[in-house]
Structures are given as C-alpha cells and as structure tokens.
Image (tube, grey):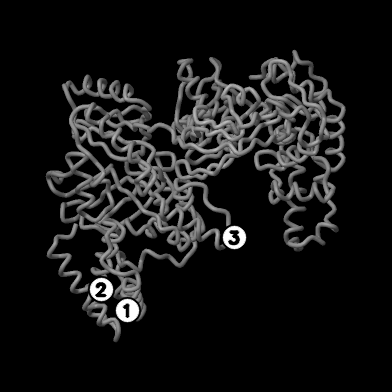
C-alpha cells in the first residue's frame, strides 16, 4: 500500500509530530496527524511490522483526541478516534446482505478434490482450470459494505440472507480500514467478505488477563472471536484485539465502463484489497493450474498449520477466473466454483494418569480419562470420556499409557489408541467398579447395553444430576439454579429430591455468605415461574431415558394431564408419532414406578402444573403435511424456536432420520443425522434460510 518513498516521508513526519507533541500539535496539522496514525496502524495490524513504539503511538493518538475535542468541526468519519464507541449497543438489528452468503462444500480427502475438479472441468469444457488456494481461517464470518469510500455497515453471516448489524464492533478491529480510496477505481459501493479471528498470542494474552480478574478463561479462539462480535460493550470488544482477514469481493457498483483489471480474477481481488490497506490473504494465497498443484499446496499448509500465528482448519480452493465462476454458477447450498478442504483432526500424545467413574442421572457409569493436560487445536484437554467399559477393553488402555488424543471435528476430544510399543512395565490395569462409586450399591449391566448402571433411584449422584437436569435451560429453565448451587444445597441438606426445589429453606439460605436479598428474590421468583412451564418441558425435565425434547412434545400433546400416561400400554405408546419399542418400554416403566408416580404427585401438591394448558395447533399452515428434524447449530434460531415454528405452521417434528422425514434442516457442525439423510435420498436437506422461506410462502 505504501511505496518506499512514502514510508520515508511518513517516518520523517512522525518524528516532526512527536517533537511538536511536547508543546502541543496545532489544529492545522490534523491531516498530517491522521495520516501518520493510519500509516502506523497499517504497519502494526496489517504488515505486523511496527515502526513506532506503543508509547509514541499513544502520544500522537492523544494529541489527535485533544485537537478533535477542542475543534469538533474537524472530526471526520474515518479518523482513528472514531473506532471507539463510548455507548453500549442496546440491540443488534438485522440487515440484508447485498449478495447471499452461501456455505462452501466440504471435502475431507484428496479424492474429493479430484472429483470436484473433474466436475468443474466438465462443466467448463476445459482440460485444466486455474485455481486460487488460501487458508480457511477458523473464526467468525463477516460482511462489510463500503459506500463512497467509507465503511457503511458490518454484518454477521446470520442466515446467509441477512445478518446482525455489528458496525460499531467492527470498528474496534484495527485491521479493518474505516475508509479506503475505492472511488479512485470508479467504485461507489462494494461488499467484502471475511473472517474475524483472535491470534493465538492475543487469545493467550486475553485469557491471562481474565485469570487476573478471577474470571473463567475462554474455550478457544474461534468461539472467542464469534462471541466478541455479539458483545454490546464496544470497549470490551476493543480489549480483545481482534483481527480480520478479508478474502472475497462479493458485489461491486462502479461508474466506469470496465471493472478494474484486478477484479477479473479472485487472486487479483486479494491483491486489490491488500493494496488498499486490507489484511487479505495476499501473502498466504497461491494461484496454480491443475488440481494436483492444489493438493500439493494443501499438504504444505497442513504441515505448517501449528506454526501459524492463527488457527486454520483447512484450505479454500476457488476458480481464479471470475467470468468462469459465473459460468459454473451455484446450487441452492453452495457455489460450484469453490470448495473447502478440511484438514485431518488435531492430534497429540499425552499420558493417561487416571480414570474416574462418574454416575449420570439415569445411573449409567461413565469412565472419564484424566490425562496430562495437552493443547489440541487451541484448547487444553485434560479430561476425556471413555463412554463405557468396552471402549477401555477395545483400546487396550492402561493407567500410565502414552495415548494418542484427537479432537473429532476439532471439537470433541477422544483417545484414538494407546501406544503399546512405548510401555515400560509400570502401567496398571484399569479396574472397572462393581459397586456404585456414589452409593455403594451393586452395579448391573442390562442385556443388550454396553453401560453398567446403578439402579438405586436414591443414589446421591443420580439425585443431584436429576435435579440439575430438571432445572436446566431446556427443561424447567430455573435461572440462577445451576450445577454448583444444586450441589451446594444438596451437601448442606437443603434439598434431597426434585420436589425439594419448591421447598427450599430460604430463611437458612439467607444466612449463607454471598446470598443477599436480591439473589434470594431472583431465585425464588425463577422457581415460582417454573411451576407454569408447558407440559412438554416438565416431561423432558423428568429425565426419562430416550425421551428428548421432541418426544416430550409428542407425549404432552397426547394427554390432558400428565397422570394420563399411567393408563398407556406399550402398544398405545407405539401408536404415537416416532416412538419405537425401546422408547415405549422406557416410558411405560417410568410411569409404572411407584417412586416416580409419588414424585409427580408431590410436584402437583407444591403447585407445579401437570395440565396440558398449551394451545393445540390445528395442523393447518404452510408446513401442513410436512415433517421436520433439526441438526447442528442454526445461524439465528435456537432449536426450540425452530421447532415451535414448525408446530405453529402445521408441521410435525420427528426425533430421528427415517423415510417418514420430509426435511432435515442442517446447521453448522451437523453430524450423523446429516449423513444418514444423504443415504436415504428421499429426505430433502435444507438450510435455515430455506426453512424460513417455506414458512413465509
């Protein structure tokens, strides 16, 4: 962006202004001051090669603040001081993207890339295609619109059609220019796509700061970046030192006859953005001809992935010629001219120190491996679920083993295998308990199941987990009554079962340290409010095995009062939508257990509603006759909100993928349900924005 002679001139001007700052820089010098500050922001945040000490930059920045404070008429929208907002955003409003943001098709091996290349060449009628290859940054997607050279709007990805307006927060990202000379190329309006992220160094620095404040650390750089964009306090966003890579020009409105030459190829557009002061992947990209060279560059980047200053989870391959991109077009889900190559899951080796056995709310015993904490993909892993005894046997795990650990999908850690070849003889066999670790009752292993179980319904560990589940957000949603508080009250003897939630001794709780009148009022109010939750939430809160939120709604809609389910036979239950033999058996056993029936009676006595007061949907609406299932994380809707929309519009919800399913709505990180739906073939797979279109038809 800056030629050598410009750099020398600006450096000399910097020294002049620093000298003048001692006595006060004059308002007549404000343009020079702004230009110098913009130059040093570029060197620091784009080039990562500062030419000025932090203290010197601060001195010049404060001088600009002082001049603008004394002369408000001199403030310009692109002044470095205009990044920082002193107000708190009350609400994020949505706005449409100029061009929809589609997801990329994913590939997980080289054969996938070759197959994609073959299809592209056949459609294009070419022997070879020129591709631009660049890193797939692991952050949060953004869309920026510049009008008349100034940053006009910044949006999140949202549902791809529209996103949340986060312009104020985007201005806190120093690598995003507040203005750029697009008009020099006849460009009046331009939309640019990119990714906001936290570098590994800034992520560590921020977590270290959180530790000094006695606050919990953030989980990983990706979630930290995504969460930062939704923070309402812009100064807190600024504190996190976010960065942004801008990697795609999606829309251009220009007054000249011809598009700028650089904007005829994708690689050229990255150079165009870089020259205008944007942090594009200009230095990271590679333009090559033929898929084999693409594969070679992907291999090269995967090998140096851990040495990069930021997290990436793959590479993005795009047809370089923009005219050819238009010819190839796109499907309803993704462009045909681009594909993401996902790297293999993160792996590391560690030492298996111990195995602890945890008791779940249904009595299942889960072995949890405690390993020497090891960083994998930006997250420190110290505990890993081993699921059941059979997994321990299959993987031949011993205490003291060196184990290979992987994060499946770069998210869930698991042990791949033990490295038996490096054993030294000090390793010990893992002994699976024969008695419950919490209550001491003998464990049983039901026929056809892999897990051992404690069948003592009064087992302390199960009781605590049942109370935690009952109060959880998707169940009775008793806010302020989280895991730690449940365990504390249980240990103090304030609560011994689920109905005990509604009999808490608030006179004794008031005597505890840290419990003021406000927290007592909030908790008691939240508990009282939960008494009138819809019946399906109560059924889900019961923690019946195999009964999730969808099945709970089916059960609720089949009765007028919860006690009516005691009259259902297993055959009656099988007649209900999407309930199979295993689920029917579990429901039947629950409602024919005297302890469970007694618990429901106690809940009704303390005022919890067991009536089905929810308005029944008449089955009419735009989704009438259709069945739906949701998988993965949706861009804008919570799962419960999406399911409610289905019912309100006459559709039905299913609990699993089958030939009865009309639509599978897939979000980010969709798993086995998506793969199963693809195999069935008759199930239509759609994104959230397509689901919303069905409703609005």
Q: Is residue 172 above or below residue 679?
A: below
Q: Which residue is mark 2?
A: 33
Left or right: 451 with respect to 69? right
- The residue drawn where x is 60% and y is 25% is 391
Q: Is residue 27 visible?
A: yes
Left or right: 536 with respect to 2? right
- The residue drawn where x is 35% and y is 79% is 66
* Mark 3 surroundings: few (<14), some (14-19) or many (≥20) residues within 10 A: few
Q: Which residue is mark 1?
A: 67
Looking at marks 1 and 3 on the same chain, the residue that comes earlier in the sequence is marked by 1
Question: In this view of the protein, which residue sits in the foreground, 431 or 469?
Answer: 431
Residue 119 picture location, percent across and down: 26, 21
Structural distance between the alpha carbons of marks 1 and 2 = 10 Å
Q: Which residue is mark 3?
A: 214
Left or right: 452 with respect to 673? right
Looking at marks 2 and 3 on the same chain, the residue that comes earlier in the sequence is marked by 2
Residue 7 picture location, percent across and down: 17, 65
Q: Please say if the residues under marks 1 and 2 sit with CB atoms less than 8 Å apart.
A: yes
Question: In this view of the protein, which residue sits in the foreground, 247 or 123?
Answer: 247
Q: Secondary structure at mark 2?
A: helix
- The residue drawn where x is 14% and y is 60% is 3
Q: Secondary structure at mark 1?
A: helix
- The residue drawn where x is 70% and y is 33% is 540
Residue 294 picture location, percent across and down: 25, 31
**Residue occupying the far front of the picture:** 425
**Residue occupying the far top of the picture:** 571
Structural distance between the alpha carbons of marks 2 and 3 = 40 Å
* Mark 2 surroundings: few (<14), some (14-19) or many (≥20) residues within 10 A: many
Looking at marks 1 and 2 on the same chain, the residue that comes earlier in the sequence is marked by 2
Residue 360 picture location, percent across and down: 71, 34
Name the quadrant containing residue 460. top right
């Amino acid at each position: 962006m800056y030629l050598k002679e410009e750099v020398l001139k600006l450096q000399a001007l910097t020294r002049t202004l620093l000298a003048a700052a001692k006595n006060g820089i004059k308002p007549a010098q404000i343009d020079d001051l702004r230009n110098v500050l913009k130059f040093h922001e570029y060197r620091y945040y784009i080039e990562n090669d500062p030419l000025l000490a932090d203290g010197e930059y601060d001195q010049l920045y404060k001088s600009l603040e002082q001049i603008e404070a004394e002369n408000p008429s001199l403030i310009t929208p692109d002044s470095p001081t205009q990044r920082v907002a002193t107000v708190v955003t009350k609400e994020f409003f949505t706005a449409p993207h100029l061009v929809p943001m589609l997801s990329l098709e994913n590939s997980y091996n080289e054969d996938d890339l070759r197959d994609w290349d073959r299809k592209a060449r056949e459609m294009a009628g070419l022997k070879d295609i020129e591709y631009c290859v660049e890193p797939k940054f692991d952050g949060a997607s953004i869309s920026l619109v510049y009008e008349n050279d100034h940053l006009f709007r910044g949006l999140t990805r949202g549902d791809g059609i529209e996103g949340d307006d986060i312009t104020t927060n985007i201005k806190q990202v120093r690598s995003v220019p507040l203005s750029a000379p697009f008009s020099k190329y006849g460009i009046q309006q331009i939309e640019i796509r990119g990714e906001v992220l936290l570098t590994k160094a800034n992520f560590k620095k921020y977590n270290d700061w959180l530790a000094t404040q006695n606050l919990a650390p953030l989980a990983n750089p990706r979630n930290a970046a995504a969460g930062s964009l939704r923070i309402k306090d812009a100064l807190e966003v600024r504190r996190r030192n976010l960065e942004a890579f801008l990697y795609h020009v999606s829309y251009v409105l220009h007054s000249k006859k011809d598009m700028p030459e650089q904007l005829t190829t994708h690689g050229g557009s990255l150079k165009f953005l870089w020259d205008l002061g944007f942090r594009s992947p200009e230095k990271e990209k590679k333009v090559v001809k033929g898929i084999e060279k693409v594969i070679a560059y992907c291999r090269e980047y995967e090998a140096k992935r851990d040495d990069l200053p930021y997290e990436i989870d793959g590479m993005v391959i795009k047809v370089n010629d923009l005219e050819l991109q238009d010819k190839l077009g796109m499907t309803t889900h993704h462009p045909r001219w681009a594909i993401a190559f996902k790297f293999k899951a993160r792996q590391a080796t560690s030492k298996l120190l111990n195995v602890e056995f945890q008791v779940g709310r249904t009595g299942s015993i889960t072995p949890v491996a405690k390993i020497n904490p090891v960083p994998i993909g930006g997250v420190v892993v110290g505990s890993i679920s081993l699921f059941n005894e059979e997994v321990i046997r299959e993987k031949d795990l011993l205490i003291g083993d060196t184990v290979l650990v992987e994060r499946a999908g770069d998210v869930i850690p698991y042990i791949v295998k033990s490295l038996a070849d490096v054993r030294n003889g000090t390793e010990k066999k893992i002994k699976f308990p024969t008695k419950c670790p919490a209550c001491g009752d003998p464990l049983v292993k039901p026929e056809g199941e892999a897990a051992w179980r404690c069948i003592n319904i009064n087992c302390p560990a199960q009781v605590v987990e049942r109370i935690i589940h009952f109060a959880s957000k998707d169940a009775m949603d008793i806010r302020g009554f989280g895991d730690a508080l449940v365990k504390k009250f249980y240990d103090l003897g304030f609560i011994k079962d689920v109905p005990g939630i509604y009999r808490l001794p608030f006179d004794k709780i008031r005597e505890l340290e840290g419990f003021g009148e406000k927290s007592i009022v909030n908790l008691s109010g939240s508990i009282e409010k939960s008494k009138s939750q819809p019946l399906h939430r109560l059924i889900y809160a019961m923690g019946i095995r195999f009964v999730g939120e969808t099945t709970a709604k089916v059960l609720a809609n089949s009765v007028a009062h919860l006690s009516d389910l005691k009259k259902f036979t297993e055959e009656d239950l099988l007649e209900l939508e999407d309930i199979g033999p295993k689920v029917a058996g579990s429901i039947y056993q629950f409602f024919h257990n005297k302890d469970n029936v007694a618990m429901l009676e106690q809940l009704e006595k303390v005022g919890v509603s067991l009536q089905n007061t929810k308005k029944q949907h008449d089955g009419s609406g735009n989704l009438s006759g259709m069945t739906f299932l949701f998988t993965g994380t949706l861009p804008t809707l919570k799962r419960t909100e999406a399911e409610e929309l289905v019912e309100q519009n006459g559709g039905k919800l299913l609990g699993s993928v089958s030939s009865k399913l009309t639509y599978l709505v897939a979000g980010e990180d969709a798993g086995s349900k998506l793969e199963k739906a693809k195999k069935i073939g008759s199930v239509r797979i759609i994104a959230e924005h397509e689901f919303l279109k069905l409703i609005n038809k």
